[in-house]
Amino acid sequence: MNIQELFGVQGLDRSKASACDFCAGPNPLVRYLVQDIKTVEIEAELTSVGEWLACASCAALIVQSDIEGLIELASERLQKQLGNKVALSVIAATVRQSHGRFWQAWKHH
Ligand SMILES: [Zn+2]
C-alpha cells in the first residue's frame, strides 16, 4: 500500500498536484526529479523519471539525508490528516516503503 492508497482506504481525496509526496502536507516547494529503477524480466532494466514534491520541512530533512527523521515527521503528519484513525505503526511502514523508493532512486545521483 502506498501513501495515496492509504488516503483512498480512508475515503479521503488528496490532490496530487498540491501535496508534499513525503508527508502529504500542503504547499510543496521543492521538486525532485529522480530516476526510478525498475527491473523488468531478466534482460531489461527500465528506468523512468519520477517526480517527487517536497514541502519545506521535508526538503530540509532530505538535504541532511535524515531518512528516519523524515519517516517520523511524515508519519505524524499523515496520522493527523487521516484523522488519527490509522495506527502510527501502519502509517510508518507505508511511509518507509514509499520513501524507500525515493532514496533508492535519489542515491544514484
Ligand atoms: Zn512534506
Image (cartoon, rainbow, N blue to C red):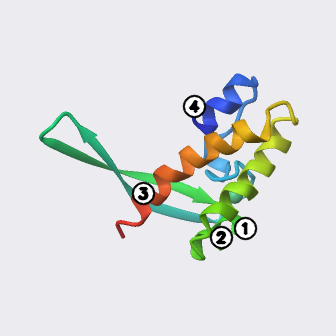
**Between 34 and 61, which is closer to the camera in this rendering?**
61
Residue 61 - label: 2
- Sequence-earlier tag: 3 or 4: 4
* Contact flag, marks 1 and 2 (Cβ < 8 Å): yes
- Sequence-earlier tag: 1 or 3: 1
Spatial CA distance of label 1 from label 4 is 24 Å
Q: Which residue is mark 4?
A: 1
**Between 87 and 79, which is closer to the camera in this rendering?**
87
Location of residue 101 in the rendering, given as x and y in whole percent from the top left corner: 47, 50
Give the number of the mark in front: 1 or 4: 4
- Sequence-earlier tag: 1 or 4: 4
The residue lying at 72 percent from left, 31 percent from top is 13
Location of residue 70 in the rendering, given as x and y in whole percent from the top left corner: 67, 61
Spatial CA distance of label 3 from label 2 is 16 Å
Quick check: 23 above or below 41? below
* Contact flag, marks 4 and 2 (Cβ < 8 Å): no
* Contact flag, marks 1 and 3 (Cβ < 8 Å): no
Residue 57 - label: 1
Give the residue type that dot 4 points to: Met
Does mark 1 have its CB less than 8 Å from ligand 1?
yes
* Contact flag, marks 1 and 4 (Cβ < 8 Å): no
Location of residue 5 in the rendering, given as x and y in whole percent from the top left corner: 62, 30
Give the number of the mark in front: 1 or 3: 3
Q: Residues within 10 Å of mark 3 (few under 14, many from 20)?
A: some
Residue at disc 1, secondary structure:
helix
Q: Which residue is mark 3?
A: 104
Does mark 2 have its CB less than 8 Å from ligand 1?
no
Residue at disc 2, secondary structure:
helix
Spatial CA distance of label 1 from label 3 is 20 Å
Q: In which quadrant is the C terminus drawn? A: bottom left
Spatial CA distance of label 1 from label 2 is 7 Å
